[in-house]
Amino acid sequence: MERQQPLSGAGISTDSGIPDYRGPNGVWRQDPGAERLVTYGPYMADPEIRRRSWRMRLDGQALSAGPNVAHRAIAAYERTSGNPLRVITQNVDGLHQDAGVTARKVLELHGSARSVVCTSCHARSSMAEALDRVRAGDDDPACRTCGGILKSATVMFGQRLDPVVLGRAMSIAKATEVFVVVGSSLQVQPAASLAGIAVEHGARLVIVNAEPTPYDSVADEVVREPIGTALPALLDRLR
């Protein structure tokens, strides 16, 4: 049995209505200033940035989106292929789990947008509850436990990845036999380096992404077709 390891990025969720960041229609190209709303320094220093960030989440589609055919194809592969599978994702939308991938087999490198965390006491609560407070008029909700600044339980730009989570991801990349990158520009480090680590340890690298990536030259296969059709076909070949 071959050990399969998908690394998914924002591109896998665009068919669910969640825009990516760096693609042709990505969030940063449409509104370059939006990056400050998810950058730790400005978020912590500027209440107006926080208010805009909460409004962005209130108007966003991540919490209402559902898994698409690509997410479901990975879930079906886990159920039926008989091959060991772990999913490392740069996404924070929880759609792999919604599609049916066993939760313990999904490693969320950048955290989860379905929770919030206090930056002072580290208490966690649900994003849905925080957004209810925003809808009710609390445009910069504070921690109910200590009054500290709340943020999404995601890794913002300017924050380091959890070293334990990153270490697990690196171990998985070293052990995999086929490393499949789906919908990632492979530009954000250290997550992008997992592709190189897998190759260095003998894995076959397959990249399914609309735009070129820095790792295309070392990939065994690069697929430019739409993810919704390309990924199910690729996983059928890998069974």
Image (tube, rainbow, N blue to C red):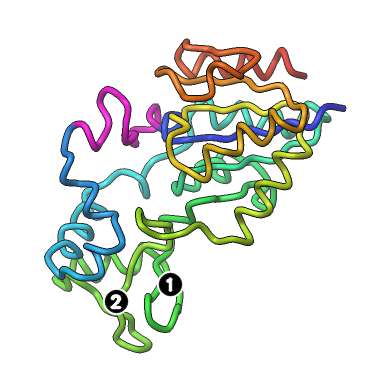
Residue at the image point whose x is 43% and y is 72% from the top: 125
x and y, in percent, of residue 59 in the image: 21, 49
Q: Is residue 170 magenta?
A: no
Determine the secondary structure under disc 2. Answer: loop
Task: Write down the quadrant of residue 72 in the picture.
Answer: top right
Disc 1 and disc 2 in contact, CB within 8 angstroms: no
x and y, in percent, of residue 175 in the image: 78, 39
Q: Is residue 96 above or below residue 120?
A: above
Query: Mainly helix, strand or loop, the magenta region?
Result: loop
Q: Quick one: label 1, few (<14), some, or many (20+) residues within 10 Å? A: some
Which residue was labeled with disc 1? 125
Residue at the image point whose x is 38% and y is 81% from the top: 120
Q: Nearer the viewer, residue 102 or 19?
A: 19
> How far apart are labels 1 and 2 at the CA level?
13 Å
Q: Which residue in the rendered view is the most extreme toward the right?
A: 1
Q: Earlier in the sequence, mark 1 or mark 2?
A: 1
Tell me which amino acid carries mark 1. Answer: Ser
x and y, in percent, of residue 38 in the image: 29, 54
x and y, in percent, of residue 122 in the image: 45, 78
Which residue was labeled with disc 2? 149
Determine the secondary structure under disc 1. Answer: strand
In front: mark 1 or mark 2? Answer: 2
Q: Which residues, given as a range, are shown in magenta?
A: 14-29
Quadrant the N terminus occupies: top right
Q: Is residue 180 above or below residue 225?
A: below
Task: Write down the quadrant of residue 31 in the picture.
Answer: top left
Q: Quick one: label 2, few (<14), some, or many (20+) residues within 10 Å? A: many
Residue 61: numbered disc:
none
